Image (cartoon, rainbow, N blue to C red):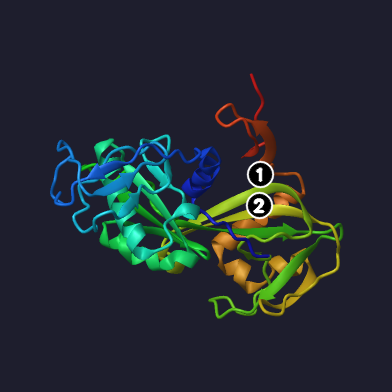
Amino acid sequence: MTAAITGWQCSLYHCRQYARMPEISLTKSCHVQRYLSRGLNSSSSPSVGHGYVRRRGGNHAVSPDVSSLSPGFAVEFLEAFDDEYDGVIVDPNKLPSSANAFASSLRVSLSSWKLKGRKGIWLKILLEQVDLVPIAIKEGFQYHHAEPGYVMLTYWIPDYPCMLPTSPSHQIGVGGFVMNDKREVLAVKEKCPCSCPNVWKMPTGYINKVDTSFLKMVAFRHAHMLAFDKSDILFVCMLTPLSYEIAIDDKEIQAAMWMPLHEFVGQPFYEEDQMSRKVIDACVAAHEDRYNGFVAHQLTSKLDGQSSHLYYDDVLHPN
């Protein structure tokens, strides 16, 4: 049983915001004097010159940093929209196709965002335009996180410490305790050079879909500085099997079987490992209705209008 949480909450929020991307609105072109220097501050006003900058979306400020542009070279602001925290989210699907155009657009856009008092800039660069990453880094962007199809960069404008959320700090895993009517536990031996070889254990790992019915969350464990120096949270869940047939993934599992409970808990490992034994005791108690665990309750919040699950001890009752 492996489970994959792609974990960074801000990215979900940003994806939801993309639906509000305004239509492109080209306004009257303005001209920028070629000799304006990189060091011009936000109170300076550009003069009319040979080059020009086209305005898109709501970004209307003119960049002072266009000294390297040739006469007549058109520079466009990056397609972007404001987030709810006075920040900016750049549309990754509308970045300029060439490196030179991207560099110029990024500079004028940064100057515009600074003049408008924006704070955090989120720049998502897709895999097919990965050559743009060094350009953004040179302009002061920082790596935030990466997924198989993109890298996320950020830029913090204010002169006080960055308040953008950090990259994911936790890995999420799950352990499934499954016991049938014969008081047999689904037990596996994993193919791993871990500290407990040849121990029969409940299936654990990162989260993938499995053919079971969820009953309740029994407990969770929190540990720090594990894989990749990240924290790790393991949720232990009570499950009901939808089938008693066992299909073994031989890439990860050495063996699997339905094992009598007394044999399972009688292994030396569980007699010596206090935490693992406490987990099994809690699972058995939950199976026998001697422990409620954390039961899923479907509720709707006014914060987002969405239905979600809140997990808590079912003994809670309103006064």
* Residue in view at x 21 percent, y 51 percent: 65
Q: In this view, does 313 lie above or below 175?
A: above
Q: Mark 2 points at which residue?
A: 282
- 307 or 37, which is in the foreground? 37
Q: How far apart are marks 1 and 2 (CA)?
A: 8 Å
Q: Is residue 9 visible?
A: yes
* Residue in view at x 35 percent, y 59 percent: 101
Please report contact status of discs 1 and 2: CB closer than 8 Å, yes or no: yes
Quarter of the image for the N terminus: give it: bottom right
* Residue in view at x 55 percent, y 62 percent: 274
166 with respect to 278 (left or right): left
213 with respect to 59 (left or right): right
Say which amino acid is labelled 1.
Gly
Residue 133 on image: x %, y %:
37, 64
Q: Is mark 1 on a helix, strand or loop?
A: loop
- 35 or 109, which is in the foreground? 35
Say which amino acid is labelled 2.
Ala
